[in-house]
Image (tube, grey):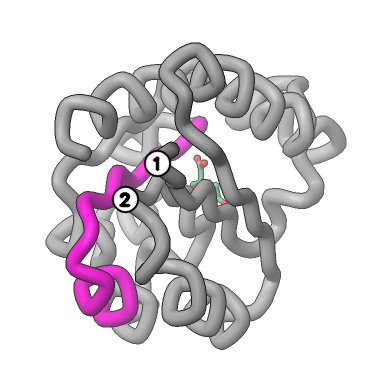
């Protein structure tokens, strides 16, 4: 059975309470269950992790990537400035898909740029929780 990593960065533990206009009303566990249910159909195991701390996200990637086939990651605001997270994703050598609930290209100028994107095979943005289902389908083609 293949394993994929589903990683969420800072403030995404607040989904459901946070800025519904941009992020919708689903909670983080709703998203994790959605991805797990879809993955189960393809016999894929999902290891989910959320942290508000950059170093913890990097530690998780370093610890888990050797036994994983791919990554789905919403890096939250780290998207826009964490070169360390970029390097950690790239260093795994795994196909990674970057997901954003909101359409970052239509928001503040500083939010439109992703330093994570060059370490990923694809960016999916603005499709709310459906973006994760699409990410899983795209990842399956690459693992
Ligand atoms: C986000 C977009 C980021 O700019 C923001 O900091 C988030 C969530 C999204 O899912 O739309 O925390 O990654």
Q: Is residue 143 magenta?
A: no
Q: Position of residue 76 (x, y in %)?
A: 53, 56
- Image marks 2 and 1: residues in contact by CB distance under 8 Å: yes
Vertical order, 28 against 133 (above or below): below
Disc 2/disc 1 C-alpha distance (Å): 6 Å
Q: Secondary structure at mark 2?
A: loop
Q: Position of residue 127 (x, y in %)?
A: 43, 19
Quarter of the N terminus within the rendering: top left
Q: Residue furthest right?
A: 17
Vertical order, 30 against 85 (above or below): above
Q: Which residue is mark 2?
A: 69
Q: Which residue is mark 1?
A: 2
Magenta stretch, residue numbers: 87-101
Question: Residue 72 occupies which quadrant of the picture?
Answer: top left
Vertical order, 94 against 1 (above or below): below
Q: Secondary structure at mark 1?
A: strand
């Amino acid at each position: 059975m293949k394993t994929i990593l589903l990683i969420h960065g800072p403030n995404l533990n607040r989904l459901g309470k946070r800025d519904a206009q941009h992020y919708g009303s689903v909670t983080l566990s709703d998203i994790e269950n959605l991805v797990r249910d879809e993955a189960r159909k393809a016999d894929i195991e999902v290891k989910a992790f959320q942290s508000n701390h950059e170093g913890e996200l990097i530690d998780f990637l370093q610890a888990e990537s050797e036994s994983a086939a791919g990554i789905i990651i919403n890096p939250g605001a780290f998207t826009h400035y964490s070169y360390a997270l970029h390097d950690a994703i790239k260093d795994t050598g795994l196909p990674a898909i970057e997901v954003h609930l909101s359409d970052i290209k239509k928001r503040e100028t500083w939010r439109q740029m992703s330093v994570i994107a060059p370490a990923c095979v694809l960016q999916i943005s603005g499709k709310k929780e459906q973006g994760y289902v699409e990410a899983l389908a795209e990842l399956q083609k690459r693992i």
